[in-house]
Amino acid sequence: MKNEILKQLLLAHVEGDDAAFRKAALQLASAESTAGHTRVAEGLRSIVAQMPARKSKVVDIAQPRGELGDVLEGGHREERLRDIVLTPSSKQLAGREHLMFEDVEQAFARLPQETSKRRRKR
């Protein structure tokens, strides 16, 4: 068991996979704790806690990629919602859309209850 964890730990280090390295180190700490080596386990956990936080990859969804990347154009708008001025009739429509969205949300929330009722009737 520990030998597999050590292999994962070394492999993650070689590949530079911080998430897998952290996971393997915590598995090793758990194995040591299970074996009754609580001081060693606490030491490993404290080292893992000192490791820098994971760097998440940020993906810009406004930038087209793939086959259509040459054809499509994307980007970020400079206007913000608070900058847009609506006419009174547009404000009414926007309010209705908000209500419609809430209705759909409520319908989805009721869906599991509705399906369980239908299953009971059969």
Image (tube, helix red, strand yellow):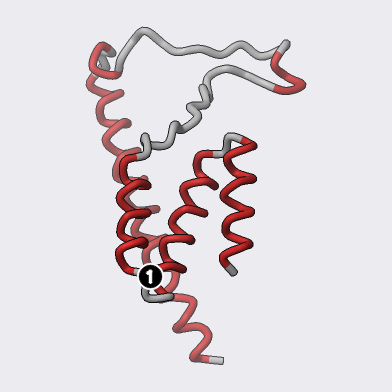
Which residue lies most toward the right here?
67
Q: Position of residue 99 (x, y in %)?
A: 29, 45
Label 1: how many residues lie within 10 Å, few (<14), some (14-19) or many (20+)?
A: some
Q: Position of residue 105 (x, y in %)?
A: 37, 54
- Quarter of image, res 72: top right
Asked where in the image residue 110 lies, by quadrant, the reply is bottom left
Quadrant including the C terminus: bottom right
User: Quarter of the image holding residue 93?
Assistant: top left
Mark 1 secondary-structure assignment: helix
Where's residue 10, x and y in %? Answer: 60, 46
Disc tally is 1
Instruction: Give me the residue at 46% from left, 81% from top.
Output: 116
Q: Residue at x 72, y 23 (%)?
A: 66
Please say if 58 is above or below 105: above
Image quadrant for the N terminus? bottom right
Toward the viewer: 93 or 49? 49
The residue closer to the viewer here, 15 or 105, is: 15
The residue tagged 1 is 33
Instruction: Give the residue drawn at x 57%, y 50%.
Output: 9
Is 89 drawn above or below residue 23 in the view shown? above
Q: Is residue 112 left or right of residue 98?
A: right
Of 69 and 119, nearer the camera is 69
31 relative position to 86: left or right: right
Which residue type does callout 1 highlight? Ser
- 17 lies left or right of 112: right
109 to 74, vertically: above or below: below
Q: Is residue 23 left or right of residue 92?
A: right
Q: Position of residue 97 (x, y in %)?
A: 35, 38
